[in-house]
Image (spheres, coloured by chain):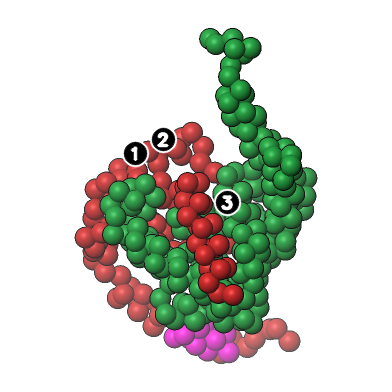
Chain colours: A green, B red
């Protein structure tokens, strides 16, 4: 094993960076569990998994990139369709993403679904759970997404509300975005103190 | 007030029987002789997943329900609460049954693509 004293400066910086990333995620999950409005063990177990971090990144990115209008969300869905179509044409990327052709097809927004996405956001500032699962399809399965949203609802991180038309509408409470923004800022300042 | 005369009791019994029998007969007539046929995709899934093959053999009537649950549009099943993430036994089952693995699929590396799409959407929709 190499003596730590002989490790070059670049490796030390890599180690520092690796620790900073882990410290950031540890702080993220510590804050999540501390903030969750539930003590149910199975719910907390779901919240401690990687998909919650991915959901937080997604919600934070929407906010940070000012996707706060129905038009912006519809534009994202169109880009998502183009992205999935490109993956579908590439067997290597299909394997990389672990998607089946059936699931990829189901994750595309058809014209009527784009209109529904637009209308839901325009009228309720919310996204249908199945549309959210579509947008996250490459990141997690729709089943994982649903399970995660049920847990996030119990924890007070999102509101799930049944619409009069039977859709399950999801609206963020902003808690996850705030937690992620805080830990990202701390990590960035730790790695690049001058920034 | 709840005591009925004998002739009313018989009348009530006949009315109830007439109300109940036709649907019951309809149900009996509606049961097909064999489980629903499988599509080509279903057959492939069953062939590739030993757990599904076992269900097809032991509980053929249940297979359709299980396959429906695995279908990509089965996004909103009953709200029965939160299931735990897979245990070691579940993971072994998933390894041997790829279709079941889809249920727990997560892919952190795909997040980068998603974040880039969001940034692009933000830039092009302003």
The secondary structure making up most of the magenta span is: helix
Image height of B76 relative to B55, above or below: below
Which quadrant of the figure has residue A168? bottom right
The answer to whether mark 2 and mark 1 are in CB contact below 8 A is yes
**Which residue position is annotated with label 3?**
A54
Residue A76, percent from left and from top: 51, 69
**Mark 2 vs mark 1, CA separation in Å:** 6 Å
Between B46 and A73, the one nearer to me in the picture: A73
Labels 3, 1: front one: 3
Labels 3, 2: front one: 3
Which quadrant: the C terminus of chain B? bottom right
Helix, strand or loop at label 2? It is helix
**Mark 3 vs mark 2, CA separation in Å:** 25 Å
Q: Which chain hosts label 2? A: B
Magenta range is B8-20
Between B121 and A150, the one nearer to me in the picture: B121
């Amino acid at each position: 094993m190499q003596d730590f004293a002989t490790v070059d400066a670049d490796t030390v910086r890599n180690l520092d960076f690796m620790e900073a990333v882990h410290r950031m995620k540890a702080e993220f999950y510590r804050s999540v569990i501390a903030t969750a409005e539930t003590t149910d063990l199975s719910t907390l177990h779901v919240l401690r998994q990687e998909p919650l971090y991915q959901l937080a990144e997604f919600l934070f990115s929407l906010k940070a990139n000012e996707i706060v209008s129905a038009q912006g969300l519809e534009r994202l869905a169109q880009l998502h369709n183009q992205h999935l179509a490109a993956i579908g044409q590439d067997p290597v990327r299909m394997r990389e993403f672990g998607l089946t052709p059936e699931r990829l097809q189901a994750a595309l927004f058809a014209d009527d679904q784009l209109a529904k996405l637009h209308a839901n956001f325009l009228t309720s500032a919310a996204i249908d759970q199945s549309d959210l699962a579509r947008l996250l399809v490459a990141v997690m399965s729709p089943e994982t997404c649903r399970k995660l949203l049920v847990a996030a609802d119990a924890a007070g991180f999102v509101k799930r509300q049944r619409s009069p038309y039977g859709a399950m509408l999801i609206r963020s409470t902003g808690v996850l975005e705030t937690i992620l923004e805080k830990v990202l800022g701390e990590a960035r300042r730790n790695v690049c103190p001058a920034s | 007030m709840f005591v009925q005369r004998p002739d009313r009791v018989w009348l009530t019994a006949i009315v109830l029987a007439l109300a109940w029998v036709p649907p019951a007969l309809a149900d009996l007539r509606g049961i097909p002789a064999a489980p629903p046929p499988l599509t080509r995709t279903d057959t492939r899934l069953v062939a590739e997943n030993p757990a599904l093959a076992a269900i097809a053999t032991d509980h053929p009537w249940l297979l359709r329900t299980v396959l429906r649950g695995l279908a990509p549009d089965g996004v909103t099943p009953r709200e029965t609460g939160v299931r735990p993430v897979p245990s070691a036994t579940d993971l072994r089952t998933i390894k041997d049954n790829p279709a079941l693995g889809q249920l727990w699929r997560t892919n952190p590396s795909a997040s980068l693509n998603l974040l880039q799409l969001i940034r692009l959407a933000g830039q092009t929709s302003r």
